[in-house]
Structure formats: structure tokens, C-alpha cells
Amino acid sequence: MPEASKGKSVLTNRLVELAKKEGFEFPPAILVRLEERLKSFRLTEPEIRAIVKEIGARLARVRVDPHESVGIIAAQSIGEPGTQMTLRTFHYAGVAEMNVTLGLPRLIEIVDARRSPSTPTMTVYLEDRIRQDRKRVQEVALKIEVTNLPDVATIGSVVEKLKVVVSPKPELLEARGITRDDVLRAVTENVSIKTFEIVAGAGSGEGRAIDIQLKSGVEEETPFKRLLEMAEDLKTVGIGGITGIKRALIRKEEGGEYVIYTEGSNLEEVLHIDGVDVTRSTSNSIFEIYKVLGVEAARTAIINEANRTLSEQGLTVDLRHIMLVADVMTSDGEISAIGRHGISGKKTSVLARAAFEITAAHLLRAAIIGEVDELKGVAENIIVGQPITIGTGAVKAIYQPPASGGGA
Amino acid sequence: MVSGLSKRIKHLQFALLSPDEIRKMSAVKIITADTYDDDGYPIEMGLMDMHLGVIEPNLRCRTCGGRVNECPGHFGVIELAMPVIHAGYAKEIKRLLQATCRACGRLIGDTISQRSTAPALGDGVSVPTVKSQEVRRCPFCHEVQPRITLDKPTTFRENGHKITPKEVRARLERIPDQDLVSLGLNPGYGRPEWMVLTVLPVPPISVRPSITLDSGERSEDDLTHKLVDVLRINQRLRENRDLGAPQLVVEDLWELLQYHVTTYIDNQTSGIPPARHRSGRPLKTLVQRLKGKDGRFRSNLSGKRVNFSARTVISPDPLLSINEVGVPWEVARALTVPLVVTPANLEAAKELAKRGPSPPPDNGRYLPGVNYVIREDGLRIKVMEKNASSVADMVAPGCTVERQLMDGDIVLFNRQPSLHRMSMMAHFVRVLPFKTFRFNLCDCTPYNADFDGDEMNLHVLQSQEARAEAKVLMQVQEHILSPRYGGPIIGMIHDHISAAFLLTYKNPKFNRAEASFLLSKVRIPMPPPAGKGKNGEPYWTGKQLFSLTLPSDLNIEFRSNICAHKSKDKDPKLHEADDCYVIVENGVLKTGTIDAKAIGQGKGVILDSITRTYGPARARDFLDTMSRLAITSIGIFGLSTGIDDEDVSEVALKEIDKSLAQARKEVDALVEKYNKGELEQMPGRSLAETLEVSVRKVLGAGRDTAGDIAGLQLGMDNPAVILAKSGARGSMLNLTQMAGAVGQQSVRGERLLRGYYARTLPHFPRGDLSASARGFVSSSYKKGLSPTEYFFHSMGGREALVDTAVRTSRSGYMQRRLINAMEDVHVEDDGTVRNTAGTIIQYSYGEDGVDPTRSIQGHALVVDDVLKSVLGKRYHTAEARGEGIQGTTPMDEGELDLLAEAQTEDEAEEEPSEEEPSGGDENMDLEE
């Protein structure tokens, strides 16, 4: 807010004021564009007035009609191109190396308000100071990407000696910025100390192996089985990075900026990483955005994701329709799905709910609660055979012909 | 008719029926399980008792005395020998049993806090559930509360011991009214014990009519069957109980009764086998009647069958206007429009009625007749040849004459699936010979229709309001601009576009005969010739003729679809050779070719501009004349394409083969590298994936080179190329696939790999990763595919087929959900967007209140257009920056400041308005 008023120029204020006198308000985009164009003109006061007046007149001409059923139009505008979308597109999004669900399945996913998308990904932007520096971006990427034990060490078992040998690879450790101590710590934390003991093994320095053997005195029926199970468990032990992020790729974008694309998503933790641009980094998991940044952000995320999915298929759908869907989904402060578990299940009208899905349950419930259907919506009124309450059905004015007697 | 005032149902109240109420509303007590006696007469107190209403003509209802159409039917009642649980309420009953004391019926648990948080009734929120496990004793009577479990569907247990429905009912009866409120129930509309049935209402016969088969055998409705079962068991249960039969027998019968009542209500209750008909088909009982797509709600209440409608095959007619529809005579004779007779039209109405139902054609022209006359008292008289004149004499003011459809009537025209509002538009009728509905080809796009056997529906409007509404809102021209993206959805297609191309590309000349023939079809007077040929013959040019369809003050500039120049340079010289930069000046096409970009659906720049500037009516005229002109002119030019249009020279063929061979070799090299493990891995990819990516890249490039070589052979004189480049049909890719190579086939976006172990077909060695073994088709469609290639091609084709089938159902369901979720959302008088419950969804529609249909490709307005229109000539001088006008330079901020300050002071005196920081808080800009 303070930023906005600070950035406002005198011309903007003047235009806004003139518009106010004409009785309208500039859509922000128009105002910006107008100001930009006007700067290259030398105009007289009457001319500016005339321009503002003309804009006002044009805006009035393109205004929506009251009672227009914009919801149905939006639903049709998004639903109809669905028939033209491809199914099962596993197209790359931005990065050739990564697959992301797009097309109809993705659109359905968004509308369903799924907890997690089938292919969660993140786009991580970096702070100004490091975004041009590949090396430092790499460092951030390594911090984000999950590193499992097998990524930096080999896990071998020596059955005859009843031990498991974890041998760290110094060059891999180096590349990931991890030390042997980290590995040791991870192993110690994930191995039951009751039954195993950890000792230093062959080799030296960073590459020195870590031997895990059964503690003496521990009685086991099948000691080798225990050992192998433990070795198997070690393979999934995470050493560094953020859980859920399987891969992080760096890509140079226009303007020489490096951006990290990830497979898997964990917005909350990624935002805490030093160097990450908190304002621009985003995830394709709408629910995560909702949890971390709130509904408003989730609304924007729905708009962006739906719009991207549609335009990726070469389908043009007016942003207003997508915005309306996003607003319907988020208007009560949380994300509700389009469907019986969300919006349609929350409708006030019994008949409308019964007509959609799970008919009998809604009717039975209505009876014992003693529910009242106010017959305000569209579906209910169609069911009882009355004109609907929106569109031309909203108009209540009735022409009263003059009282009879001499056709006046 | 009452003058516009109609009664409205204000609200519906849902409630439970009490046993008393059921008894009170029933006309007869049903005790016999039999239906009809040997003479086929309904048995008294049987399921077909005539007190329940009648379904046969000539019989009168014993209750109300009405005939079939007058009597709506009456309920009966079955007194159940023992109470049974209503299966639909089993869960609810369990909740209540758990939440209340088994002895005193009071609410247990933290009663005080529960009462204060009791939800408002009927607001749909979940009611508090009480975890009875935590509570051991009743706070009022200190009775120990055992755990209650529910054995689906209807058996309750307490510590494993069965509780009989009778006991359940007794416990529910004990719950006091004031505790019910806390449990979310409204005692005013239903006591919980009513969820345990003691009497069963029997629906009227009209709800479950029996049908008489041809053999004279009666076939009863499923509900009747089920009720017979209930009655039989009920009877046996009563007898056994009264005779003091063993407990076990009574219990078994009781359970059987429970089963029958449960399936009578819902035959798909989980946990019990559905009751079946003799033939093995599951019975359709009460819930099944309501549920699902074919249930009462979706099939009969949300959508209804209607009269005054027709359906037949569609076919094209380029000579009709886009807002007309050709209706066959036969259809027109069957559909009627009600005509209310007044003193003013009395004579005309009499004249009409006199014609009868099938007046002879007047000079071969169709004349509308009259099918029915409705007298003032409501009696409907069928007009026939014989009684026509006598009925006509009877016609008086107040009568309604049902007149047959005629030219100029407005009707609704629809094609399923109705995915958007353009699927149902209003057309004006043209009654035509032959038996199909016909319309202008431009209307194919919004309906998504073609003529390979499609059928469409037509509805005749029956009231003045409906006709007025249709005329204003639903006519075809009102839908030229799509609300989806603010551009034209109705436009020229296929032949119209290729014709417009031929007409304007390189500006062909026409002699007097041709030009006058063309213009005669569009009824435009001949303009003076464009010039004279060498032999002194006057000629007219294609661009000149095209221009005649444009508004005379249209000005527009853009690049054609055929334009291949990448530069955004507006310099016409660059485009001159290709004639692809369109300039229209004062309604005259100066340069450029008209193609899909100008008049096609979707983009249609000229069409868009005409619709916006001159209104839908002018746009309709443009489409009408333009489509006629196009069809006529393509008849003069002639345009046909065949497989020889993809002929390529021998040399080129060799080149194509060479480039494809090269690509295959490269792939082999890659595969070898991969096998040797020398392939450099891509970041984040496995080695195999890396190979696939690079192979696909190589083969893609190979196909493209082959295509390019073939493409060079296909010039703008090639009809197929004309079709593709003008945007009429097909693409250059299609052509190169015919002439060059078809390219890689894929399933699930990958090269083919399924089939046999480690190979696609037994023609290849195991593990063969080469191009041809994994679905690369090197042949062209023209050359023909090799057997393996053919097989691969079929694999790809099958996937596409399956995809379409799956997609339609998935997107259909998504759209149904979207519609259902958003149907109530509308703009209010104050500009806010709300649903019908009054919840505000948006404060201003789309954040700027702009209707996308009226927007310019989504923008409220184009700033430069405004500046141009306000500033006129000054705009252009100022646009060429640096020079300035009259010695002035572009404004700088300083000057502006002065200007603004001066102004603000002036204003401040006029109206001391408080400075409101508006505009700044809207950071949700629409991208311009």
C-alpha cells in the first residue's frame, strides 16, 4: 500500500481525479498504459479531459449487464474447451528435463482442489545478489535437493563378518557440500543403538568407511536378516536437503538469471532457505500455497495454474472466467473443490444438492432436520417449475396496462 | 391469461411423516397381498384398491370420484406387525442412541457446552457428534452406558447383544424435545422415533401403474411387487406372533420384514443382497427411482421433455442468412404457434382457420394452416379438412388459433452436446421443400456441427415474452463474439476462406459477364469497372468486388495468415511480393489477401472490427453476403485437390530418402554410443531417457527436413497449399506427411516399445532401438506405408481414438460440476458478483466490471484507439516523437506538475473532496 501511493505520479492522481468527476474508476491496467502513452504527448487540459471522458464512455459500453449469469458463462467457457484438450499430456513446463501433468487432467486436478498435484514442482527464484551467479545458485540447489545416503556413499554388507559397511565417496560429498560427519550423524540417528554399534572402518579422511556391526551380547535368531534389513533402511536415509524435493535443476532464463526448478514441492521449507527470493518463488501445489501464504495467494495460484494449463494447449479463455472460478473456490476463506465435496455440497438448497449427486442422503437428512428450501437458486426453481431468479428472470417489473375504459 | 402476475412457491419445508399423519392421509388400509381377483377386478383392501386412484379409463376413483386424468391418486397404509428400522436413517439413529441415555433418554456428555454450541437448524452444518465411548454413565440417572454398534445396514448391538427395533424405538421416544435441538434435530418437524417405522405408506396406483401386455397378462410395477412381499411377510409375522410361535420363528420373520422394507426403500443398500425380479433383474425401488442420471431428479425434474419441438438431419444451405433455418414442410405443418384472437386479427384468424390443416400450395409456395382451435372455455378442437369452415366460423375474440409454422417465425435451434450458450440460438424460419433442417455454413462452428448425419432440434416459442427474449438475446448475430475470449466464434470456414483467398490474392480480373454473375448473387449493383484490358474490354478486380461487402468507412491494417515474414515491419513493400499485408482504407481493400486471419472464426480481424464498430446486424449482413460471394466465386475459379497435388519430383524424392537415411544413421550412431556406455548423460535424466530424448530430436529434425524438401516442391499454385496457407483446412504438416515422411509414431508420448519381449514386433531383433524398430515411419502417405510402419501407425491411431473417448466423458463430468457449482453466480444491481444465497464472490466482476464478450480480446479498451479517436490527426504527428507539434516537445514531469497543481487548486475551491487514496490498493492488474 505505501509502495503504491509512493509510485503514483502526479499525472496518475490527476487522471484518477478526473475520472472520479466523470463518475468512474480506471481499471489499473488502463491507467498504467494511459499514463505511459500520455507522457509522449503534449496535451492541453481540455484534451486530457476529453480523453478521460471518452474512456469513461467506452468503459460504460463494455460493462457487464446486471443479473448476467456470469457463473454459467464462466463454467461454459472453461468446460467447453475441455473437450478440445489433450488427455495425458506429460509435457515439459519450462524445463525439458522435467515432466509435469498438463492438459485436461491438470485442469481437473485444479478444479478438484486436490491436496497435492500428481506432479508437484516448484519454481524457485533467487535473490538479486546471487541470481546471476551459477555457482552460488548451485549451492542453493544442493541445499534444496534431498540427498539420500546412497547419493554420497556406497552401502555394502559383509555377511560373513556380520557387518554393514558405509563408504562415503569424498568427491560426491564434496559436490553436495556434505562432510563425512554429516553422514556419520545420519547413520547414527537412523540405526538402533541398542542392537548395533558403529565403528570407524577402513580408509582415511573423508572417505573413511563406517562399519556397523551387531553389538556383542545381542542375541538374534537370524542376525544376518536383521543386518540386511538395516542396510535396506539406510538406503532411504536423508542426509541433507528438503524432504519432498526429489530433484532440483538449474536453468538459465532470459536476462541471464538462473532459476531452480524442482521435482517435488515443499514451499514452506524452501522459503526458509537463504538466498531464495520469497516474493517470486512458487509451487504448483495450490494447497501448499494456501497453507503457507493464505487464501489470497491460493486464489492467485489457481488463476495462474488454470490459465497456464489452458494457454499451454493454445486455448484462449478470458482471464475473468478463470478468476471467477478461483473466487468461487476461495470466497469462504478456504479452498473448496468444485464438486460434491466442495461448493455443490455446501449449497443451501436441498433440491439443488439432491439433483446433483447423492440424492437420497440429502433428502433423508433434510427431512429429519426439518430443512427449508428457500427456492432462491437456479436448480431448485427449475425443479419446481418456476422462472429462475437470475438473468431476465430477476426482473420483477410488470407492465400494468392502464385501467380499462376507452383505450387510453 | 392473468396479466403477468403469477404465483410463486416461496419455500419448501422438509419434514418426517409421523405414523399418525401417514394413517390420516391414507384412503384405505391395505391388508391383502393380492392385487386383482379372477375377473381382473381390483381386490378391496388390496394393493390395487380403487380407493388409491384409478389407471384405467372409464373407471372412477372411489375416494374422489375423479377419472384417470382428474384424480392424482391417494395413499394407502400398511400397519406393520412389528416396527422396523428405516435403513436410510440407521446412522442417524446410531448417533442418537449413542448420545442419549439408554434409560432416561437424556442427552449425556458435557450437556451445557453442547447446548450453547448447538447449530442453527437446517443450515446444513454438521451437528455435534458425541463420542459415547468416553462417557460411561448418564449424568442424570447414573445408568451405565454400554457401547452401541451398528451392524450394517440395520442391526443395532449393545455390548454385542442385539437391540430390537422395538427397543430402539422406545429409547428414541424417551429423548425429550429440548435435547433434540442440541442434537441438531427439529422436534417441530419430526420426532426421532418416527425413523423407526410402524406404518408404511402405500403410494397411489398412478405412481406404480400396472401394464397389460399384449397377451392379456398383467405385469405389475416393481414397487407393487415389493409391497406384496412386505404384506405377505407382515401377515405371516402377525399370525405367528399372535399364535405365540417360538421366539426364533418370530425373530426370523421380523428380520425378513426388515429386509423387505429396507429394499422397498433402497434396493442398493450395502450389506444386503438386492431384491430381484423373477427374471433376475434387480428391482427398481424408491431410491433407485430418484437417483442418478435416469432418476426423477436429473431426468424428469431438472430437464423435461417438451412439445412443439422437432428433430431431423441437418444439411448446409449457403443461400440462407446466418440467422435463418430451413424447415421442411412436413415439420412446419406439425409445429404450431398460438395466435390469440382479438378483434384486430379476427378476420385474419378466421381466414387461417378456414384453410384447414393442409392448405394446398399457393403457386408452389407453402401456406400455413391451422391444427387446433382452442375455444375461450378451453376446449381444444382439432381442425380437419372437413370441419375447417365450421370451426372458422366459430373463431371469436378470446379463442386461440394454433397456426402452423411459417416464414419469419422465430424458433430455437440446438445441437447436443450443448456445451456453451452458442449451442442453442434463435433463428428465423424459412419453410423449404425436402426433409432436412438447413442453415448457413458459418453456423457450423458454434454448434460444432457437420453434415455427416448430424441431427438437430428445433423448438417453437409459445409466448410473446419468450419470442421477445429470443429476438433480443438469442439470435445468431448476437453470438458472433464469443464470451469465452471476446473474439468472433462465428466466421467463414473452409470454402469461404479459400474462395476469399482466390478472389483477392494477386487481385484477379473478371470480365463483365463474370463480375455481373458474381454480384447478382449478392444483390449488389455493379460498380464502374476497375480498368480496361488491352483489347478494350472493361474488367473488374477481385479486391474491388470483395470491398463491396465491407462498410464504406472501414479502416484496418494487419498481416494475413499467409504472411511468412517474421519481421513486424509494417513496410508494405516487404509484403508486396506475397500480397500479404492487408490495408483496408475507407472500405476499400488496397493491398493484401483475405484469408482466415481476416474473416475466419477465432481470429477474423475484419469480422471482429465490423461486429464491434457497426453492430451485430451489420456483421450478419457481412457474413451473409460474403459467404454467398465466396460460394459463387469459388464456382468460377474452381478448386479441387487430390493426391497428385502432393507429387514431388524424382530428385526431391531421392533427397528426402537421403535425409531420412541420414537421420536413421544418426540414430544408429546414438544407439551404439549408448550401448557402449559413451553417451553423455543429461542432467536429471537416466541414460535411457537421454537416448530417447536425443533420438526423438534427431528423428524430428529428419522428418522436418524431409518435409521441407517436399514443401519446396509445393508452391502457392498448388490447391492443397492454398487450403493450408489460407487457413481453410489442413496444415502444411499434413501436406508434408503426404509428400515427405509421416514421422515418428508415439504412444503415451514415447517411441513405441510395447508388444513382444524387448521388441515391438517379431520383425526386429530383441533390444533393437533403431528408428524403424521403434515406430519411425519413413514412408509418406502417398508412397504408402510398409507393413511394420502400417502397424505402428495403427498403434498411434488407436491411442488417439481411445483418448477422445475417455476425454469426452471426463471433460463432460468436469463441466457438469463446474456448471453446478457456479450456476447461481450472477452480477447484482450494485455490480457485485454474488450467488443466489447472497454471498459476495467478487466486489466487481472480473475486477473491472467488464463483460468479456464486449471486451477487445479481453481488454476493456485499447488506449491508443481512444487517443486516436480523441486527438484525431494530432495523434499521428505526436506519435512520430521528437518533432513535436507546433514547436512543442513531449511533456516532461515538471511541466505536468505545474499543470496538475494549478488544476488541483482550482478544483479544491469548487468541491473540497477528501483525498481518497483510490486506485492504489488494486494491485491485481489485468495484463494489457
Image (cartoon, rainbow, N blue to C red):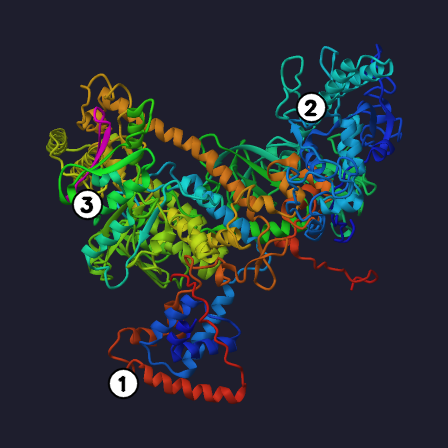
Q: Residues within 10 Å of mark 3 (few under 14, many from 20)?
A: some
Instruction: Name the kind of residue labelled 3 in the image.
Output: Leu
Mark 2 or 1, nearer chain start: 2
Residues behind callouts 3 and 1 on a single chain: no
Q: Which mark is residue B263?
A: 2
**Spatial CA span between label 3 and label 1:** 71 Å
**On the image, which quarter does residue B442 sit in?**
top left
Q: Nearer the viewer, mark 3 or mark 2?
A: 3
Vertical arrangement, residue A284 with respect to residue B889, above or below: above
Q: Secondary structure at mark 1?
A: loop
**Viewer-nearest residue: A265 or B199:** A265
The percent coordinates of residue B120 (x first, y second) are 70, 51
Magenta residues?
A154-172
Please state the chain letter of the residue tagged with numbered disc 1 in the rendered image.
B
**Viewer-nearest residue: B229 or B733:** B229
The percent coordinates of residue B508 (x first, y second) are 27, 49
Residues behind callouts 3 and 2 on a single chain: no
Please state the chain letter of the residue tagged with numbered disc 3 in the rendered image.
A
Q: Which residue is mark 1?
A: B887
Q: Residues within 10 Å of mark 2 (few under 14, many from 20)?
A: many
Q: Is residue A86 left or right of residue B28?
A: left
Q: Is residue B89 left or right of residue A283?
A: right
Instruction: Name the kind of residue labelled 1 in the image.
Output: Gly
The percent coordinates of residue A296 (x first, y second) are 47, 58
Instruction: Name the kind of residue labelled 2 in the image.
Output: Thr
x 52%, y 38%: residue: B415
Vertical arrangement, residue A194 with respect to residue B623, above or below: above
Q: Which residue is mark 3?
A: A173
